Image (cartoon, helix red, strand yellow):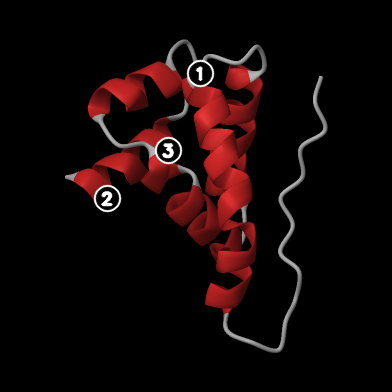
Amino acid sequence: MIGFTIEIIPYNKPVNHCKIKYLHRFSGTTRYVLSGGSQRQEIVRHLNGAFVNGATEVRDLIAVSFVENIDSEEELELALQDVTAEALRAEWHVQHG
């Protein structure tokens, strides 16, 4: 089991500054998921749960730094293969629809 925590560090600046700080971390996560990494399913389940249950800032962060980096429907299907992640799927369709 992996240790995976999504945490927004409070700043006295708009949320966008937090997103920029963490953007590259999730870009690497997206690449790992798309590569079929051994913990892909667990990561996608965790991100989907955080997207569903997290604060607005967490949902926004996942939307702009994970979902947005999935470029095609083929990549989406690869990322979500054998994982129930309907919230991430729906967000992808909102962004790419």
Front disc: 3 or 2: 2
Query: Which residue in the protein does label 3 denote?
Result: 88
Query: Which residue in the protein does label 1 denote?
Result: 35
Image side of residue 52 versus residue 4, left or right? left
State which tag comes first along the sequence, 2 or 1: 1
Q: Say which element carries label 1.
A: loop
Locate residue 14, reporting x and y percent: 57, 84
Relative vertical location of residue 76 with respect to residue 64 in this rendering, above or below: above
Q: Say which element carries label 2.
A: helix
Q: Say which element carries label 3.
A: helix
Q: Quadrant of the C terminus?
A: top left
Residue type (three-letter) at the residue carrying disc 1:
Ser
Locate residue 94, reporting x and y percent: 26, 49
Q: Nearer the viewer, residue 29 or 88?
A: 29
Query: Which residue in the protein does label 2 denote?
Result: 95
Residue type (three-letter) at the residue carrying disc 3:
Leu
Q: Quadrant of the N terminus?
A: top right
Residue at mark 3 to residue at mark 2: CA–CA distance: 11 Å
Image side of residue 73 versus residue 66, left or right? left
**Is the residue marked by circle 3 packed among few (<14), some (14-19), or many (20+) residues within 10 Å?**
many
Front disc: 1 or 3: 1
User: Residue drawn 72% across and 81% down?
Assistant: 11
